[in-house]
Structure formats: C-alpha cells, structure tokens
Amino acid sequence: MRKNDFERNKLIYNLYFDEKLTLSSISHQINLSVSQISRILSNSPRYMQEKNIRKEKNKKKHREQAKEIMRNKRNKNQYEEKQIMEMLHNQASYELSYDLSFIHSMSNTAIRKNCSSAYKNNVSKERFELKDDMAYSTDMPKIIKY
C-alpha cells in the first residue's frame, strides 16, 4: 500500500468512525465512489459493529418519527371532531332553547324535526299539521308542507 493510500484510508476511517459521517458525504469529500469507500471501510474490524449500531439507531429514529406522525394525525382528527361536535352542540342548543324567538329564524323543516311530537302527518293533504291537544307557542306554524 502506498503512503498516499494509507493517508486516504486513515482519513476515511477518521471521518466514518470518529466524525460519524455517512458513506455518501465521505465520498463527496474525498472524491471516491460510495462503493470504494465501503470497500475500504470493510477492511476495518470496527466497520460491521459501527454499521450495526447505526442501523439500530436509524430504526429507532424511524419508529419515533412514525409514532410522531400518528400522534399528530390522531390529534388533528380529535381536534376536527371536537370542532364538529361543538358546532352541532351550539346548533342544537340554539334550536332547542326555551326562547321561542328563534322560530322565526328556523326553517319549517327544522321546527317540525325538533318538535316532531307536536305535529301529525296528514298524508292526503301532503303536509304536517299542528296537533290540537298540544300546548304550543303562537309563533309555531300550524301547517308545514312537504
């Protein structure tokens, strides 16, 4: 082995084992191919041990990244579901409040849906009619056509 090659190999060993650089970054610095770097490193007894350590480290890092992605996705879904539930809750609270002034802003279909026990279905006339035996607000429509 020439002195030049010895110095180059020593530099490769230093970059890989001590500075923990990857094969590709070493190949860019030294201007050799990745396979040549790998071939040089494989002559070292420390190479397989270091390679396995890096492999395990990368597996652990990958698992942590996958967990973080799933955690973020789950949190996003929970946030969206919470927003939807809050909107539905507010809407239901508004529609079912005891203040009957909301009836003017509700559609007849929504009134019939939320006050279904107050209406009977008149199939022959294709409409819902307010039951006579019920106590109801004067603001409620007496007839709802469908």
Image: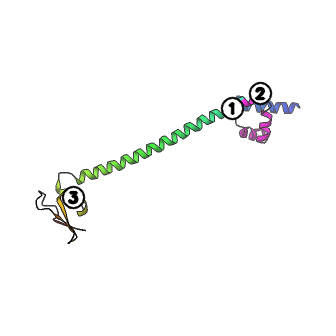
User: Picture coordinates of residue 63 (x, y %)?
Assistant: 57, 37
Q: Residues within 10 Å of mark 2 (few under 14, many from 20)?
A: few
Earlier in the chain: of badge 3 and badge 2, it is 2
- Residues tagged 3 and 1 counted as in contact (Cβ below 8 A): no
Decide if residue 88 is on the left or right side of residue 114: right
The amino acid at mark 1 is Asn
Instruction: Give the quadrant of the N terminus.
Output: top right
Q: Which residue is mark 3?
A: 116
Task: Give the percent coordinates (x, y) of residue 122.
Answer: 19, 68
Tell me residue 67's x, y (percent).
Answer: 52, 39
- Going by the numbered disc 3, the residue's amino acid type is Ser
Residue 10 tag number: none
Q: Indicate the secondary structure of the residue bearing disc 3.
A: helix
Magenta span contains residue 43: yes
In this view, the mark in front (3 or 2): 3
Q: Is residue 143 above or below residue 9?
A: below
Residue at 22%, 52% in the rendered image: 96
Whether 81 is drawn above or below 30: the answer is: below
Dividing the picture into quadrants, the one containing residue 17 is: top right
- Residue farthest along the bottom direction in this orientation: 125
Disc 2 versus disc 1: distance between alpha carbons?
Answer: 13 Å
Number of residue marks = 3
- Residue nearer the viewer, 69 or 122: 122
Q: Which mark is residue 52?
A: 1
- How packed mark 1 is, by other alpha carbons closer than 10 Å (few <14, some 14-19, many 20 or more), is few
The residue depicted at 28 percent of the width and 50 percent of the height is 90
Q: Residue at x 17, y 55 (%)?
A: 100
Say what amino acid the circle numbered 2 marks: Pro
Camera-side residue of 64 and 7: 64
- Seen at 15% across and 65% down, the residue is 142
Q: Mark 2 sits on what residue?
A: 45
Q: As drawn, which residue projects farthest toward the front?
A: 124
